[in-house]
Amino acid sequence: MNEVSTQAEHAYEGLVQEIIETLQEGQARAIASAAEHRFTTYHAIGRAIITRQQERGWGAQVIKRLAADLRLRFPDRTGLGERNLQYMCTLAKAWPEPNRATAVARLPWGHVTVLLNRLDDAELREWYAARAVADGWSRGVLELSLIHISEPTRRTPISYAVFCL
C-alpha cells in the first residue's frame, strides 16, 4: 500500500469508529429515555389506582379486575397483568413525587422491581439504583449486591469477582 491509500484507510477507519460511537451513544440515550418514560407512565398508573382506591374505598380486587379489562383492551401488550399493576402502585408509594432525574428512572423495569421487593428504605433504594446505573449492573449483579442487605447501613457493594474464578 502506498502512503495515500494508507492515509485514506486510516481516515476511513476513523469514520467507522466515529459512527460506531455515535450509534452507541444514541442507543444508550434512547434506552435511558424509554426507561424514564416507562417510569413516569407506570408511576402515573400506580398513582391513579391508589387515588381511586382511597377515594372510592376500593380494595385490592380492583387490581385483578383492571388487569383483566386491560388484557381485553390491549391483547398484544405485555406488562399490564395483576402483578405489574401492583408493582406500579408500590412504585407510586415508594416515590410519591416522581423525579425523572432520579437514578431509578433510568433502570430497566426488572431492576426497579428488585429494589421494590428487597428494600424498604428509600435512601438505600436510591443508593443502589445510582450504583446500578453508574456501574451498569445487570439485574443479577444488583440481586447479588442485595444478598447481605441485613446490614442496613451498607454503602460498599460486595465484590463478587471471586465467583468468576
Image: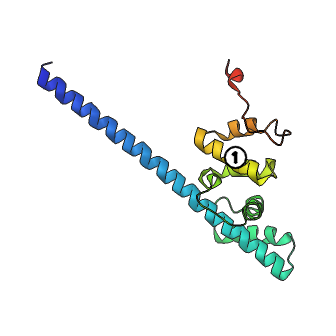
**Above/below status of 12 relative to 40:** above
| Colouring chosen for the image of the structure | rainbow
In front here: 72 or 30? 30
Judge from the rendering whether residue 25 lies leftward or rightward of residue 131; answer left or right: left
- Name the residue beneath numbered marker 1: 127
Q: Residue at x 71, y 28 (%)?
A: 159
**Above/below status of 88 relative to 55:** above
The picture quadrant where one finds residue 14 is top left
Label 1's element? helix
Residue 121 visible, this orientation: yes
Residue 150 locus on image (x, y percent) = 86, 39
Which image quarter holds the N terminus? top left
Q: Amino acid at mark 1?
A: Trp
**Above/below status of 106 relative to 90:** above
Q: Residue at x 15, y 25 (%)?
A: 5
Residue 75 visible, this orientation: no
**Above/below status of 62 relative to 93:** below
Residue 69 locus on image (x, y percent) = 72, 72
Q: Residue at x 87, y 79 (%)?
A: 57
Q: Residue at x 72, y 74 (%)?
A: 48
Judge from the rendering whether residue 165 lies leftward or rightward of residue 121; answer left or right: left
Judge from the rendering whether residue 135 lies leftward or rightward of residue 69; answer left or right: left
